[in-house]
Amino acid sequence: MAAKQKVVAKKKPAAKKPAPKKKAAAKKAPPNKKQPAHARPAVAVSEPIIASAVEKLGEVTAPSGTLALFDVGLVGYLPRPALEPALVKAEVPRDRALPVFGRRVGKGRFAECWDHVAVKLGDGDVTHSKKLGEAGVDFARLVAMDHGALDHWQHEDSLDGLADFVFWGRDAASLARAMRAPSTKEGFGWSDLTVEAAEAKALEADKIKAENHWLLAMDYRPHSHHFHALAEARKSKNGAGTITVGDAKICLFFTSWGDGVFPIFLDLDADERPVQVRVQLNTADAAAATARTR
């Protein structure tokens, strides 16, 4: 009897063989899941802004009716005629402030980076998008600015006759001792010096650095529009700042991805009404999502 019981015990596992059929059924599921994706617009270019899932970065106004998005750091290197082709422009409402929102990636290695930043133009659900152009970024920052405000923008000239000079890096402490520089949040340096005094500090620091072959970064910062916009962005947890230039509010924000080329879209609702102007910063996921819907 004991021998027979052992034979029966060996045969019991064989009764569980139907399990592989469930695995086979699971393999057929993905084709069915893909079908709805073909019926809806590109995920990356049509996802609407939802207030509970985004962060407000600031706001802009566009009295001229034309909004420009571009790397404002280029203003210090390109004359206006050469800069103009680098501006991505959009026609926007001129009678009200337009909020600027950002949505983070939210997961994975780049969770804290922006998926996109958008200037909200109206209500409604986004159903499709029109590409306006691409912003080339060399200084890790973008600005949403009234096109007319560029005529009032002072990129390097101090607005109040004052300037800062700061430095940081491996040998910054050595330079600070040599120049008796106070410490700052970024490293060492001076704030609110006259332009002449700040320039003198910069020249002295550069000479000492070269003589000792020290490694460190230095930044001379006249109190220009660029300075004030960057100062607001640096102290913000979102890396964005709003200031007034002429009669317009502008919003500068760090890309969070560094430099690159970022596509800009006008997102529309089903009735062709503009909902938002969107800078797509997470370009890798956007390309993958668009490919899945083709």
Image (cartoon, rainbow, N blue to C red):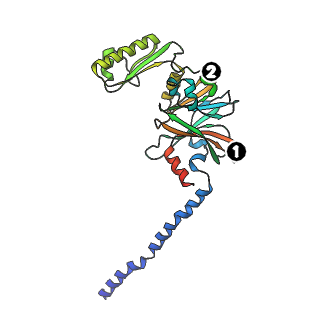
Seen at 60% across and 57% down, the residue is: 38
Seen at 62% across and 24% down, the residue is: 149
Q: Amino acid at mark 2?
A: Gly
Where residue 240 sits in the image (x, y, percent)? Answer: 53, 31
Determine which residue is flagged by label 2. 246
Characterize the local packing of mark 2: few (<14), some (14-19) or many (20 or more) Cα atoms within 10 angstroms: some
Q: Quadrant of the N terminus?
A: bottom left
Nearer to the camera, 238 or 1: 238
Residue 60, image quadrant: top right
Residue 17 in view here: yes
Q: Is residue 197 above or below residue 56?
A: above
Where residue 174 sits in the image (x, y, percent)? Answer: 30, 20
Tag 1 and tag 2, C-beta contact below 8 Å:
no
Characterize the local packing of mark 1: few (<14), some (14-19) or many (20 or more) Cα atoms within 10 angstroms: few
Determine which residue is flagged by label 1. 272
Residue 242 in view here: no
Q: Amino acid at mark 1?
A: Glu
Is 173 displayed left or right of 90 in the figure? left
Where residue 191 sits in the image (x, y, percent)? Answer: 44, 17
